[in-house]
Image: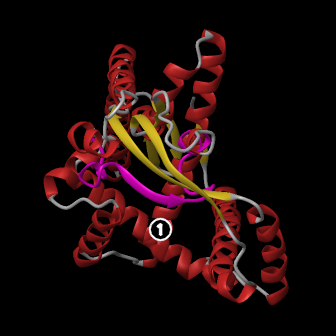
Amino acid sequence: MRARKEEPMKKLIGTMVAALLLSGAVARAEQVDRVAAVVNRDIIALSEVEKRAAPELSRLNGAVQDPQKRSEERARLLKGALDNLIGEKLMEEQIKELGLSVTDAEVDAAVADVKRQNNATDDAQFERLLAGEGFTIASYKDFLRKQMSRMKLVQLKVTPKVKVSEEDLKSAYTQYTKMESGDAEVHARHILVQVDPKAKPEQVEAARKKALALAEEARKPGVDFAELAKKKSEGPSASDGGDLGFFRRGVMVPAFEKVAFTLKEGEVSEPVRTQFGWHVLKVEEKRAVDVPPFDQVKGELENRLKMQKTEKYVEQYVQELRQKASIEVKI
């Protein structure tokens, strides 16, 4: 009898000791890296949240001078980053549960596609481009693999719900014609001075001064902007003289686009800050855009509507997962 009584007692003591050891380990871990949230049994560290929000936080430091407003905006950015990470954690659980996976060949094909889209002609240039966004080749492949896994989950759980009717398309075309009518497209070149997302304020300022000097040089009589871009730009388009071709509104990042559509033909901008660094723009040409007929843009409009509806249904799907999950936010 005694042996049977002692056995449960040993198990209980063992469990208590394990719990004490675990709590000590968690306490030590939290001293090193605070826990931002617990999603079911998974932990999201504060460092993960800060890393996700790093590009926006970097821009914030130079854009908002008031300490209180900067603190409030920082909190908002961290909350948004945490919400995204929570959603991703929940989707990852579903991916594991459903046994979805992405092969190395699929990841390599995606990397090759990204290289092609960014005109990265060699690995060294691509690595510099990734470094500007805080990635190594290995970490970017891991990022892509997770993204592609989530896309497979979306295709399985969300895509079947997405429907676009003929009425939807005609309504979208009406809005499209209102937006595009009388608008222009711009042919621009740029010189990029890269800034690391984790750069300190003094490094950001040093890069701005470098870009300012390049803008002044570009405005000098007889200076060929394209040749200057080839020699000085740190962006992937440097080999093409910084040529961005013609583009319409809604294509470039907002800060870049705002300046491009404000400049006159032949005019060179002051340095413009984006997540990539400081840009010096020159507008080569502006031209009016005729609104194409419905049949010509129908496919584009359909893709756009499908994307918008997919985003909406993904948000709903994640909210459903959140309602079923145990989530504890600690920041």
Residue at the spot 42% in from the left edge and 55% down from the top edge: 244
Q: Is residue 50 left or right of residue 288?
A: left
Closest to the observer, 45 or 42:
45
Q: Quadrant of residue 63?
A: top right
Q: Is residue 267 left or right of residue 146?
A: right
Q: Is residue 194 visible?
A: yes
Say which quadrant the C terminus sits in: top right
Q: Position of residue 176 (x, y in %)?
A: 76, 69
Looking at the image, residue 217 lies above or below residue 290: above
Disc tally is 1
Looking at the image, residue 307 lies above or below residue 168: above
Q: Position of residue 96 (x, y in %)?
A: 42, 70
The amino acid sitting under disc 1 is: Arg
> What range is drawn magenta here?
234-258
Closest to the observer, 125 or 68:
125
Q: Position of residue 130 (x, y in %)?
A: 28, 48
Residue 244 forms part of the magenta stretch? yes
Which residue carries the number 1 mark? 150
Residue at the spot 54% in from the left edge and 59% down from the top edge: 247
Closest to the observer, 220 or 209:
220
Looking at the image, residue 310 lies above or below residue 43: below
Element under label 1? Answer: helix
Q: Position of residue 164 (x, y in %)?
A: 74, 84
Residue 313 forms part of the magenta stretch? no
Q: Is residue 174 left or right of residue 125?
A: right
Closest to the observer, 80 or 63:
63
Q: Is residue 163 left or right of residue 283?
A: right
Q: Is residue 45 visible?
A: no
Q: Quadrant of residue 121?
A: bottom left
